[in-house]
């Protein structure tokens, strides 16, 4: 893969600066296991520098006190730059995290759309400022305005490196915040390139800093810093707990988009072939590394074996290999640690009684890279580890059910609550199930579609708060009440002193 990887430094307040220690981390391509570049490893001192620069920018008002229309111009310019550089950015992302190139290009389209969408909301924010509230009292004029929070920390994952960063960055910038982006050390290349694009479009210095490095160093320092007004985090539930705890110590809000173990329920009136396609897309998309993956599949007993037979045939036909090749539908998992973790879960699943339908290890034609064949485990029970824990790899656990009530109960019996899906020809049944599932997102007759205009987030151990749509913008806004006494009369609560 002859993809040029720029040697970038930390991006702080509009300038490229070397990290405090000068230390760098290797970038390892997951499809070849070769070192293809490096990223700077920020220290706590670097975090202090970034926050100091962002705080100075907030106080200057050069970004926070501008109009939404002004900020929208930069967001639109970023969207245009992303489209202009789409091919290169997609290849860089595939090199970095192993995502198939077709998926990476799709993600880049979504990145540009997201910037454009929040540019539009930024403009509309101007129209809604100082909106009146009828308080039922003629003596007072009450208005509400929405303002930037200040310095916000955005901590993002490796499975959608640039897209997840944009989900946070676009609304945060639209709201007028000065942002410090900390991408995962496992996939930071495109986020550093986004900083370069921001520099090209003339984004005011201080509006964006990008610091790369280890989560236990840079991420921890950022999460616990008292200079942060808010943290927005996407990642594992375990790390989310640590980030949330650190934010709480400073009484700072933290929105959390965490892990999942989402359920897909297929009833016996479903079109089996269509349902099989959605079952695969719901679990094997993004190489199975997606928090909303519908990795718990419940199939009605009447079609269970037929479904499994068709699923086996289709899963074994998935094109897995070099993710840079057009038409590839599955690449490697992100690194050696994740590779070993997923294989261990598969081993546990079979030891606990799961029936291996297909997959289970490295594809025979791929001797290098962190590739795992699409894996289906059948006859899984609710007590099994692979049913209860998030695997974050191309592993689909399947069980049967006989009644709607049983299916809903099985789906809801989870510590997670990010998403769920139901496939049936009965629209009324689909609506009942959708309303009964304990999660933040429900798909009917599909799995995984996502749009930047619609809210995204979960409940239980899948986190709290909502990203995307107007909800995503409100995440980064402070609401201020402005009340004016408009009567010409003296308030006269206290009687004036007697003149006698």
Image (cartoon, helix red, strand yellow):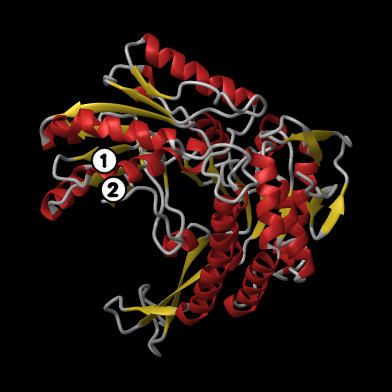
Quadrant assignment, res 396: top left
Q: Position of residue 46 (x, y in %)?
A: 80, 42
Q: Where is residue 391 in the image (x, y as percent from the top left)?
A: 46, 27
Say few, some or many: other residues with alpha carbon within 10 Å of mark 1 (under 14 / 14 to 19 / 20 or more): many
Say few, some or many: other residues with alpha carbon within 10 Å of mark 2 (under 14 / 14 to 19 / 20 or more): few
Residue at figure coordinates x 48%, y 57% from the top left:
475
Q: Position of residue 17 (x, y in %)?
A: 87, 50
Residue at figure coordinates x 56%, y 72% from the top left:
119
Q: Is residue 295 left or right of residue 245?
A: left
Disc 1 is placed on an element classified as: loop
Look at the picture and state if 3 lies above or below 67.
above
Look at the picture and state if 466 lies above or below 79.
above
Residue at figure coordinates x 66%, y 34% from the top left:
31
Per the image, the residue denoted by label 2 is 274
Residue at figure coordinates x 44%, y 37% from the top left:
317
Nearer-N-terminus badge (1/2): 2
Q: Is residue 379 left or right of residue 492?
A: left
Per the image, the residue denoted by label 1 is 438
């Amino acid at each position: 893969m002859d993809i040029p990887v720029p040697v970038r430094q930390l991006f702080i307040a509009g300038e490229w600066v070397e990290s405090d220690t000068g230390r760098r981390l290797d970038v390892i391509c997951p499809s070849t296991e070769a070192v293809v570049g490096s990223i700077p490893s920020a220290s706590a001192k670097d975090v202090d520098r970034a926050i100091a620069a962002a705080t100075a920018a907030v106080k200057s008002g050069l970004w926070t006190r501008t109009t939404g229309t002004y900020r929208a111009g930069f967001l639109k310019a970023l969207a245009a730059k992303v489209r202009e550089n789409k091919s290169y950015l997609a290849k860089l992302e595939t090199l970095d995290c192993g995502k198939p190139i077709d998926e990476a290009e799709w993600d880049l389209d979504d990145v540009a759309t997201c910037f454009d969408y929040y540019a539009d909301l930024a403009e509309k924010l101007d129209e809604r400022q100082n909106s009146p509230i009828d308080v039922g009292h003629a003596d007072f004029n009450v208005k509400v305005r929405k303002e930037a929070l200040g310095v916000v920390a955005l901590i993002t994952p490796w499975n959608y490196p640039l897209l997840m960063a944009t989900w946070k960055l676009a609304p945060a910038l639209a709201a007028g915040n000065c942002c410090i982006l900390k991408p995962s050390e496992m996939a930071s290349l495109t986020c550093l390139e986004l900083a370069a694009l921001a520099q090209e479009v003339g984004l005011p210095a201080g509006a964006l800093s990008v610091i790369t490095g280890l989560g236990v160093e840079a991420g921890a320092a950022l999460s616990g810093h008292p200079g942060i007004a808010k943290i927005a985090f996407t990642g594992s539930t375990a790390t989310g707990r640590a980030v949330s705890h650190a934010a709480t110590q400073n009484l700072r809000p933290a929105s959390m988009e965490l892990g999942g173990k989402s359920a897909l329920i297929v009833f016996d009136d479903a079109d089996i072939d269509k349902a099989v396609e959605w079952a695969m897309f719901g679990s094997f998309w993004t190489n199975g590394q997606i928090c909303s993956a519908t990795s718990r599949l419940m199939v009605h007993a009447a079609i269970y074996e037929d479904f499994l037979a068709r699923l086996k045939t289709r899963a074994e036909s998935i094109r897995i290999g070099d993710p840079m090749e057009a038409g590839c539908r599955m690449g490697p998992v992100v690194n050696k640690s994740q590779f070993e973790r997923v294989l261990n879960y598969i081993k546990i699943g079979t030891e606990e009684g799961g029936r291996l339908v297909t997959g289970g290890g490295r594809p025979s034609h791929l001797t290098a890279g962190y590739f795992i064949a699409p894996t289906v485990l059948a006859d899984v029970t609710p007590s099994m580890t692979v049913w209860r824990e998030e695997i974050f790899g191309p592993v689909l656990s399947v069980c049967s059910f006989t009644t709607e009530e049983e299916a809903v109960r099985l789906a809801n019996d989870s510590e997670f609550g990010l998403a769920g899906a139901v496939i049936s020809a009965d629209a009324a049944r689909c609506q009942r199930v959708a309303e009964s599932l304990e999660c933040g997102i429900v798909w009917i007759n599909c799995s995984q579609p996502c749009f930047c205009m619609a809210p995204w987030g979960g409940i239980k151990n899948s986190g709290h708060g909502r990203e995307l749509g107007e909800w995503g913008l409100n995440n980064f806004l402070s609401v201020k009440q402005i009340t004016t006494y408009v009567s010409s009369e003296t308030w006269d609560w206290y009687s004036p002193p007697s003149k006698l």
